[in-house]
Image (cartoon, grey):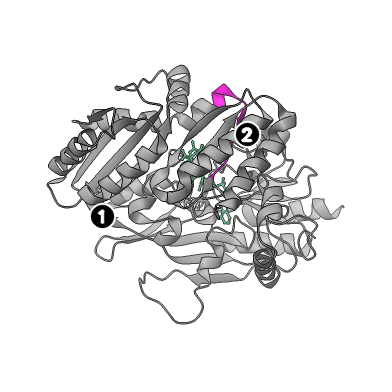
Amino acid sequence: MTAHALLLDELRDICGDAQVLTADLDVEAYSTDWKNSVRGQPLCVVRPANTAEVSAVVKACNRHRVPIVPQGGNTGLAAGATPGPDGEEVVLSLLRMKAIRDLDPVGMTVEVEAGAIVQTVKEEAERRGRLLPVSLAAEGSAMVGGIVSTNAGGINVLRYGMTRALVLGLEVVLADGTVVDGLRHLRKDNAGYDWKQLFIGAEGTLGIITAAVLRLAPIPRESVTALLSIADVETALKLFALAQDHVGEALSAFELISATSLGLVEKHAGLKSPIASGDWYLLVEASSSLSGLQPAMEKLLEAAFEQGLALDGVVASSRQQTQALWALREHVTEAEAREGGGLKHDISVPLRTMADFLVEAGKAVTAICPSAAFNVFGHLGDGNLHYNVLMNGAKEQAAVNRAVHDAVVRHRGSISAEHGIGQYRLGEWLRTKPESEQLLARAVKQAIDPGGMFNPGKLFPATLKGDAA
Ligand code: FAD
Ligand code: MLT
Ligand code: ZN
């Protein structure tokens, strides 16, 4: 019997025959990323039911020196959950571990298994009068382990922070199968290194997250959403300052959408903006547990018109209208995928240089690919835009990628604000990240996963010493 066959038998003993998938048709959905840009071939997909089974699976894989690719909802946009092409890695799917173990509405915490769907946890929190303040268009499929492992952002980072800001405790399984139980419902804990921070945003390269304790928030009683059209990004930044002045800490979303993005949404999703006339649009939301937001938002709009910042604008006056405005934003990613040819970037730069960045990057891209179109949208309030270039020439894509990231580096920005490095940005991470920071990252990998059991070829090249077995 080969080593792989022995391992498969052991995995079947641990999880049951039905939870170890090997047939091409069965592993298909686990073998490619959401964008369908990278295709892998796992040795098998294993679906443990609980932390003890995860630990036993990791121990077995470690004994046979077969690396593991952790996978949640597989909605990641960096191909981080996609196995390599050689049938040498086990995909460990968390999808059966979805229990909401404990929800405390007074302490405002929820303890939940890694495979729980984000939307399901949000719905349960809402039923108990609390908010899980993470919001992204993929939340109907993304899982808790996935958002923690990517440190996901989304549209409410402005108000509540990235996923990292919500994580109070983690349970993780290390490469030797040790279960580290850090599931504390504490807001304050300075007893030694805060080790959980290493696993947040680690993209499955250090261990398997099996459960998390997340912070909840009060449900805002009032929420007001407005869509404005504007002429340019400098104006958007002026409006951002104005919004801070008018609604302050209640500002929960400040999203920029280009007219090109709205055009794609209209073309592929049949949704049309209720206002027109700008090259750019802003979707602004304020929410609060106290009342009185509607007049504050109306004053903001008045001031925006008086100061000549807004060309047109609308404030949603019903839940239905609010949903319709947000649908315009939420459909951009899918519309871009249908259009095809989208070269994704997930950049952040300091807000004060965002307009300069856009000019520089635009010139550089056009010089390489004169026919390129720009599907730019995203979380302007966080200094994070999805600067996506619509182009057909696969040959020029690498050059465009580099040109955009060079502009990012000039502005001391980041080549990934929220999606992560995975496989998609590995080359660019190695090219642009300062050596000293890469060395620190490698030191962490070596310390926690010295045998390279977890997610080879993601964040680090698979050939890194001590990486893939
Ligand atoms: P997966 O895709 O399964 O995995 C992502 C990474 O985490 C992989 O490296 C994987 O190995 C690792 N991983 C997964 N589970 C575990 C675990 N339990 N333990 C260890 N490692 C694990 N992202 C944003 O940040 N903001 C957005 O606004 C946003 N919007 C999106 C909209 C759409 C339409 C789509 C398709 C994606 C969007 N994303 C967004 C990207 C994606 O939804 C997030 O990255 C999400 O956090 C991924 O969760 P997942 O469960 O699907 O993880
Ligand atoms: C978003 O903000 O909608 C997401 O991060 C998805 C994307 O970049 O396409
Ligand atoms: Zn985003």
Q: Earlier in the sequence, mark 1 or mark 2?
A: 1
Of circles 1 and 2, the one toward us is 2
Whether residue 295 is situated above or below residue 51 in the rendered picture: above
Other-residue count near label 1 (Cα within 10 Å), few / some / many at <14 / 14–19 / ≥20: some
Q: Which mark is residue 249?
A: 1
Q: Which portion, as a residue range, is magenta?
A: 337-346
Relative vertical location of residue 420 with respect to residue 373 in this rendering, above or below: below
Mark 2 nearby-residue class (10 Å; few <14, some 14–19, many ≥20)? many
Residue 344: within the magenta?
yes
Residue at 49 percent of width and 34 percent of height: 376
The answer to whether mark 1 is within 8 Å of ligand 1 is no
Q: Position of residue 216 (x, y in %)?
A: 32, 58
Residue 62 in the figure: left or right of residue 334: right
- Please tell me which residue lies in front, 420 or 104: 420
Where 28 falls versus 402 (above or below)?
above
Determine the image quadrant of residue 169. Answer: bottom left
**For the point 25% across and 45% down, which residue is it?**
286
Q: Secondary structure at mark 1?
A: helix
Please say whether residue 138 is one of the residues in the magenta stretch. Answer: no
Say if residue 219 shows up in the picture. no
Image position, residue 267 (x, y; %): 46, 17
